[in-house]
Amino acid sequence: MDKRKISLFVLGIVVLIAAVGFSVWDSGRSTPGTCVILPQAYCDAVEESYSDGQFIGMTANIPPLTKVYAPFDGVLKYSGTTTMNGREIGLWSVENNSSGSLDEQSVATVFLANLMRIAGQQNTANVKKGDFLGRTIQSLSADNGYNFLVDFKRYNAVIGYSLTDADLTRQFFPAR
């Protein structure tokens, strides 16, 4: 065999070993946990978080490539970015009302995390409870002790916008 064939053969073996290693590492993280949103190993790491005495959601410090799942049937939407600790962070939501009209039953789950979507998928997609949404792509600056935040918002017709629903948010993390 010439050097080129040997190099390609060795490269193929390295890629195969890397794929098997990733598969083994990912095997315990490949299904939603009891919290539905994250694998079980990270459901248990989620904590209530407050800012100025107000509940802001459930937070965790999770590693890059952690899978994130849909909490209920709805529409996944990318809403842009916000700045957290000097870094741009993605804003994603799953909304239970695909028509876009808001009423008292309208609920949105807001994720503050940088997610890598599957190649070719759009930033808006219909999803079912437990569907894979994406993977976190980097650990964020965790000055606040977390790099992933999720909260559930419910539309309030009296004031005309959505507010964090702490009770609903806590229902997804019953052990907390």
Image (cartoon, helix red, strand yellow):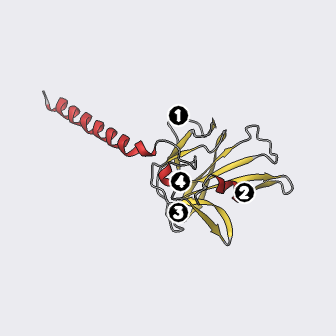
Q: Disc 1 marks which residue?
A: 120
The image position of residue 156, as x and y in percent, is 81, 54
Q: Nearer the viewer, residue 111 or 131?
A: 131
Which quarter of the image is occupied by the C terminus?
bottom right
Label drawn at residue 144: none
- Choose between 162 and 5: the one closer to the eye: 162
Quadrant of the image containing the N terminus: top left
Distance (Cα) linking label 1 and label 2: 33 Å
Query: Horizontal and vertical percent for residue 80?
Result: 62, 50
Badge 4, how many Cα within 10 Å: few under 14, some, many 20+? many
Where does label 2 land, which residue? 165
Q: Earlier in the sequence, mark 1 or mark 4?
A: 4
- Residue 14: x percent and y percent? 26, 39
2 or 4: tag closer to the N-terminus: 4
Element type at mark 2: loop
> Which residue position is annotated with label 3?
146
| Closer to viewer: mark 4 or mark 3 | 4
Residue located farthest toward the top when viewing the structure as drawn: 1
Could you tell me the amino acid type at mark 1? Gly
| Residue that appears at 65% across and 57% down | 170
In space, the residues marked 4 and 3 are separated at their CA atoms by 13 Å
Confirm or deny contact between disc 1 and disc 2 (CB under 8 A).
Answer: no
**Marks 3 and 2, how far apart at CA:** 20 Å
Horizontal side, residue 1 vs residue 112: left or right = left
Three-letter amino acid code of the residue under disc 3: Tyr
Is disc 3 surrounded by few (<14), some (14 to 19) or many (20+) residues within 10 Å?
Answer: some
Q: From the viewer's perspective, is the residue at label 1 or at label 2 nearer? A: 2
Element type at marker 3? loop
Name the one closer to the observer, 144 or 5: 144
Give coordinates of residue 133: x percent, y percent: 56, 42
Residue topped by disc 4: 43
